[in-house]
Amino acid sequence: MNYEQSLDYINKLYTMLGYDLSLKRIEKLMEEMSNPQDKIKIIHVAGTNGKGSICSMLSSVLVEEGYKVGLYTSPHLEKYNERITINGVQISDNDFADYITYTKNCCDQIVKNGVEQPTVFEVVTAAAFKYFFDNTVDFLVLEVGMGGRCDATNIIKSPLCTVIASISMDHTEYLGDTLDKIAYEKGGIIKPNRPTVLISPHKEVKDTITDICTQKNSKLYFSSKTGAKIKKQDITGTVFDIDNSVISYKDLKMSLLGDYQLINAAEALMAFKAINENSDVKISDDCIRTGIKKAKWNGRMEIVENEPLVLLDGAHNTDGILMLSKSLKKYFSDKKITMLIGILGDKEYTQMLELIMPMASKAVFTEPNSDRKWNVDSINEIIKKYNTEIYVEKDISKAYNLAKSITSKNDVVVCAGSLYLIGELYKLSK
């Protein structure tokens, strides 16, 4: 298959519904591919919010140390290639097509043997494992797709370290409707005799992860708080200290924006302590500091235009919107904010709006390019209580131009609500 044909194959897999959440398909598929994932040093990251940023920081530090580092993340903003990178370079269109073709052939073989067709995420994950192995990466920083216990990435057996990022309510139809149930699913990636990292203020999350670590003899590096102290902060970056029960650093620098990135930085720093103490891999303090400073992550509190300043943020659930609203108060308290909002219909959109709408002097509602989109025709009843100038434009491109046109050049347009929305806006902002 060429690149377009490989994308067509992937898109057709999206229409195949009714899969159970299990590892049986990916197990058979990886066996057919000779289990390349077992031959790679992996750092595995799960969580509700922040796992992509943590992966970016981990990768940046390892690259700074001089290693060849694979990074597997999801979803993508513009094209599938973003999910599979080595030292920041995306897989080429030709290689993507070749590895999807190879994986499709392996899928066809196991289907002949009576195995159910693997899902699209399983196919792309398997192709990524093979690509990283063939390119002899020193490390793979691996982000969980959804949940953890039954996620395709959980085929790995013995990671260098397991990182559990911020846990909050999301994907409740699949992961459970309480924090301890969700923590149980996320904690399913914890492996025997390998260290685990967790920062959480929630007792039920700590207790659940602690129980899993005890059962699996996994040393838990835990702090109930980040322990971050901001020394300087503006839209160019943050200078901060971190002092919690696990780590202590002075005068760290980070270019990623958002107070929530302090949590992610603390988890990444704790992960390197766990790796240094539980493996023969040693990461220097200098490379940790430089890597954290250089880390980038598209679509998270990212400024893409000026006059007016346009900020894209992938906040797509209640916890993410809460963290975004706190950051906006800190960075832009002296400016008027126009919100460009597009939310999926299966999210807690009422709660999300309650958190973010008081920040806005104006708001433009649009619809993400997804079958799961929240239909903006139904917004009137929900938003009538907000004292905000409201606009509705279903077309994302028109909504983006509208939001900029109604915002003075000295104020801010903030775009949030769905990664589907952010992906489309990322293209428009170039």
Image: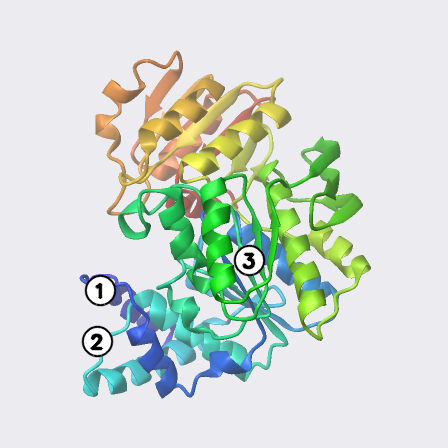
Which residue is located at x 72 percent, y 50 percent?
A: 247
Tell me if residue 77 comes above or below residue 62 in the rendering.
above
- Please report whichever mark, 2 or 1, sits nearer to the chain's N-terminal start: 1
Q: Closer to us: mark 2 or mark 3?
A: 3
Residue 103: x %, y % from top left: 36, 80
Q: Which residue is mark 1?
A: 19
Q: Which residue is mark 2?
A: 116
Q: In terms of secondary structure, where does tag 3 sit?
A: strand
Q: Quadrant of the N terminus?
A: bottom left
Q: Is residue 311 left or right of residue 352?
A: right
Q: Nearer the viewer, residue 416 or 369?
A: 416
Q: Which residue is mark 3?
A: 163
Residue 430 visible at all: yes
Which residue is located at x 61 percent, y 19 percent?
A: 333
Q: Nearer the viewer, residue 86 or 40?
A: 40
Amino acid type indicated by mark 2: Glu
For the rendered model, the colour scheme is rainbow
- Please report whichever mark, 2 or 3, sits nearer to the chain's N-terminal start: 2
Q: Is residue 13 left or right of residue 208?
A: left
Cα separation, mark 2 vs mark 1, equals: 9 Å
Q: Are marks 2 and 1 in contact (CB under 8 Å)?
A: yes
| Number of residues whose C-alpha sits closer than 10 Å to that of mark 1, classed few (under 14), some (14–19) or many (20 or more) | few
Q: In terms of secondary structure, where does tag 1 sit?
A: loop
Amino acid type indicated by mark 3: Val
Cα separation, mark 1 vs mark 3, equals: 27 Å
Amino acid type indicated by mark 1: Tyr
Tell me if residue 289 comes above or below residue 154 in the rendering.
above
